Amino acid sequence: MAISDDLPLMGNLPNAEIPFGLPLVLASGSPRRSQLLSAAGYQFSIDPASDSAECGVCSRETAPELVARYAFRKAEDVARKHAGKMILAADTVASVNGQILGKPSNEQHAAEMLRTLSGKRHSVFTGVCLWSTVDHRCLVEVVQTELEMEPISDQVISDYLETMLWEGKAGAFGYQDGNDWIRIVNGGSESNVVGLPMERLKELLESFEESAEKINL
């Protein structure tokens, strides 16, 4: 099932021309990011960044700082292998009361994350990096979306864990999974929670030629 089927409000995702007409490379193996790009009509290839591009949380690093750094490192890693292309990299985490929640390592870890989020308002941050390998210029942006999770019982958590839908998802949940115990507040971006803020991506592509900065490799 396509993401646009799961989330009707995302049926008309925005898109933009790729600067300089460059081929687009998604530096991510996330099926959700691929689905979002495809639903918006982008043509792209996929070359996931190596695991070494994600090197843990630095001391006192905030969630926005973390996702910006990871997105940049992922783009940098893949850019070295693709001449004359536009690299798109992203990284997403959840954050509650200053605690960063990335992807759960196993089912027990996922349960701990869901208990931490239960009954709380929290944020999802996605770092996005666009990198042109024609002139090695890039843009990095962080998008925040606020969510609120209802108090959920251990039985609800157990039932959700059995679906295995939590695997590979920041905060151990997928907004697109149809759960009625999680909602976006303050009119935030649905696609950002899924893993790629499509509205902001369009704006970044449109402003890339004027706003991108030179990177010294």
Image (cartoon, rainbow, N blue to C red):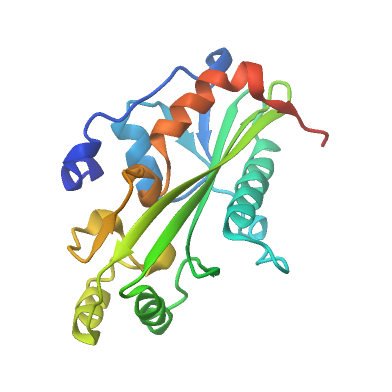
Q: Residue at x 20, y 45 (%)?
A: 7
Q: Nearer the viewer, residue 170 or 149?
A: 149
Locate residue 120, reporting x and y percent.
Answer: 35, 70
Question: In this orientation, which residue lies closer to the viewer: 74 or 12?
Answer: 12
Position of residue 207 relative to residue 165, above or below, is: above
Q: Quadrant of residue 192?
A: top left
**Quarter of the picture holding the C terminus:** top right
User: Percent from the top left, x then y, of residue 167?
Assistant: 37, 67
Give percent across and percent down for residue 30.
42, 51
Q: Quadrant of residue 62?
A: bottom right
Please tell me which residue lies in front, 194 or 134. Answer: 194
Residue for point 49% across, 52% down: 125
Residue at left 22%, top 44%? 2
Residue located 57% across and 59% down the image: 63
Say whether residue 31 is visible.
Answer: no
Is 119 left, or right, of 53 in this rendering? left
Does 107 sit above or below residue 77?
Answer: below
Q: Residue 76: x, y in percent?
A: 69, 42
On the image, which quarter does residue 215 sit in? Answer: top right
